[in-house]
Amino acid sequence: MKKQFQALLLIISILFSIIPQDVASADADLVQSQGTTVSKNETTQKTTFPVHVIHKAGDDKENFVIVIMGDGYTLEEQDKFLQDAAEKARGMLTWSPYKEYSDRINIYAVQAVSNESGISEYGGKSVDTYFHVAAHGKALVFTSGGADKAKTLREELEESYLDAGANVGTIHVLCNSEGSFGASHNSLFSFSANSEDNQNGTVMAHEIAHSIGHLGDEYERYTNNPNTSDTTNPETIKWAKMLGFRGIGVTQAGTETAFAPSRECMMRWLGQPFCEVCKMELARNLNNPDYVSRPAAIYVADPEISIPHSKTGTLDRDSEKYRISEKNITKANNWDLEFRTVVQNMVNREQHLKMTFRIMGADGTTVKYSEEKKYTIPALANRYDPEAAKESLSITIPDVSGLVSGDKMEGKIVDADTGEVLATDKTAEQAWSMVNLHYKLKKEDGTTEDIPEAETTTVYVPANSTYTLRNPQLAGYSYIGSDSDRNVVNVAGENVDVTYYYQAAAEGVETPKPTPAETDEPLVTPTASPTIKPTLEPATATPSVTATPTTSPTATPTQQPATPEPTLSPTATLEPTLSPPTTPTVRPTKTPSATTVPTLPPMNSPAVTNMPTLPPTNSPAVTNMPTLPPTNSPAVTDMPTLPPTKTPAATSTPTLPPTQTPAVTDMPALPPTNSPVVTQAPDVNSTATPSAEPNISGKQKDVTVVVKLKKNRKLYPALKKAVRKVEKRAKKQGRKICVKIVYKTGKNRALKLDKATIRFLVRKKIKEVRWVNGKKQVVVKLKKIKKQKKKYLYLKITKEKG
């Protein structure tokens, strides 16, 4: 028996000596992952999957890191994933306040490989994907340990890829599906898909706002978020310090007992800007010191000048009627005139601000009114109590009179310690420029080429300002310089290009990671729309507020009174979706704190359909909310179907989720004002021919897309196809697109544009639609299309008799 055992060992040894020690392809080793063979170079790649730089402007420790992971993308679809991820990320960064902090956000894409393309559906098809994401209604959830896989990849990034000491702030899972899906499980995970709604990153912007900003859906019944409330009391409501500022008031959310600060906000309607409450919360959390080593010191909301109005009932664009600028300055006569902003201290050190407001004659020298106040903003001593470090600042000039057309106004918010202007009354309307950061590999022969693992990064800065180069490191490369001879670049035009140069890191040698000296000096925040390049500002201290008027108005006319992640396995490891506003969840530096599934507060949205157009302020908002899933299914909430604009759906009370079922947030419908609801394509038929009209004047003319209507062919698909053929060229040349719809007969005929068509026209920023019928035509401008709140838009030409 002993001899037989020795013979067996000998045979095994011989077999192992025959098998080569290194089995490799010509270019790379092969790594097995979930039954899928993936190409990988061990000398440069230390993560399970390749990582691609989507947007990087500075050190990962100083910037908030967002990681996009793809699910349902096969090995052959990785180029598509990178294209999808880059498109969504660029679109998201055009929305404020992501835009203002585009220099303080880094975004990476992890190329996770799935065995099959697409995603699974509960009760339907099953797709073999890496993270096992499944659609539950219109929400997306992890199943079969998908969350654990994502957390493992996050740890790899923090330990082996990101700059030293950096942490991942949040993970967004982009699913390879064209369905209208979206969800946010907690501060770590959010989801979206390749739906038409998300083409420009709008859904991603909404869902990541749930995770980063701990924001709730403003069309729901839950009231435990910073932007939702269970009271209308102006003294105790969460956004009391912002009431009456830039359209912030009190309006109903999903039920008669839930309230929101705005009727037009990204957290209620996709495609709308974030309201001021949500912008401030996002800005504060993008500067969370758990993820950002040098947070911005203070956030200053875009100041405004206005005459008296209701602090609770003047909502959204209604506030524009009371806003005063140099264009309508005479409207302020006989009214009190207020220059106001709201600020949030974001560091543990009090801030000293000076506020000045002047009205001058047309000559720019005669001062008609002038006032100044100084404020001390309390330190943010407790991140769980941001309200203690938030202040509403204002100067009111009473009973203004004698203002004439041509008079000038000047309002400023100034850092009293440094003299830096943080914002002005013109900040909200300022123009923006783009600084495009290119990453080039410099070869030994002196030639250069694009670094394949990095996209061009676009940072937004105010026009006619400056941009400070931050010389970011890239994993696998060594930074060697830039094409600029100075660290500060003047930004005078619409676009400024900067190229960073790198060398490939020596094989087997780890790329040196920057380790900047530790400092407690945070950055001064870019305001909601900054006018001056941010500088450094230190931190730590004691609160106090003082106000000292320095001068008085020169005229005092009669005073006019003011008008009033869940999984299907039993061992899920999730973080709660949100914490109450007073006790937000703070993750440790490296790993998330959750190891068991907590009972989550009913904070975000259940499955919703037919979100109606919002009623007037005093009228209850109505929603359709079906029963949530049973105990064994994760409690998820999906995107509501886009609502009919006029007719609200009937209210029904949803069945509450089981005690151990975590909630998941969903995507809101698109707004009726800018993004009309999708309906079936109209029964109008067409073929489309994109064409550019001849440039007679020599100037850049609009690109005109001609769509010829024929019988039994649909307008919307042809229109969509035609516009997409020319939009890249038009965008590159800075030209706008016009649509010309032609029907050759001269008969009386009406053209019906349904909401799918209207939404497409608005999203693509079509300048105008020209409906040509025989020798007559009707022209509708984009502004008019945006204002349509009806279900359809009819264009009709009546042929004159005789």
Image (cartoon, rainbow, N blue to C red):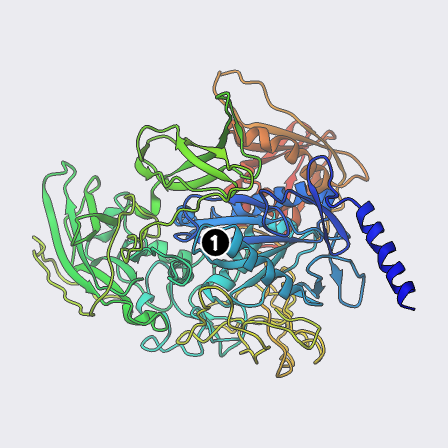
* Quadrant in which the C terminus is drawn: top right
Mark 1 is surrounded, within 10 Å at the Cα level, by few (under 14), some (14 to 19) or many (20 or more) other residues, namely many
Question: Which image quarter holds the N terminus?
Answer: bottom right
Locate residue 711, reporting x and y percent. 80, 37
> x and y percent of residue 114 in the render?
73, 53
Q: Depth check: 329 or 459 in front?
A: 459
- Vertical side of 606 occupied by 679: above or below: above
Residue 668 visible in image: no
Is 798 positioned to the left or the right of 220 in the image?
A: right
Badge 1 element: strand
Disc 1 marks a residue whose amino acid type is Val
Q: Residue at x 62, y 43 (%)?
A: 82
Residue 26 found in image quarter:
top right
Residue 262 percent across, percent down from the top left: 44, 64
Q: Which residue is located at x 28 percent, y 58 percent?
A: 520
386 relative position to 738: left or right:
left
Q: In the displayed structure, would residue 26 be above or below residue 358?
A: above
The residue labelled by disc 1 is: 65
- Position of 649 with respect to 36 (left or right) is left
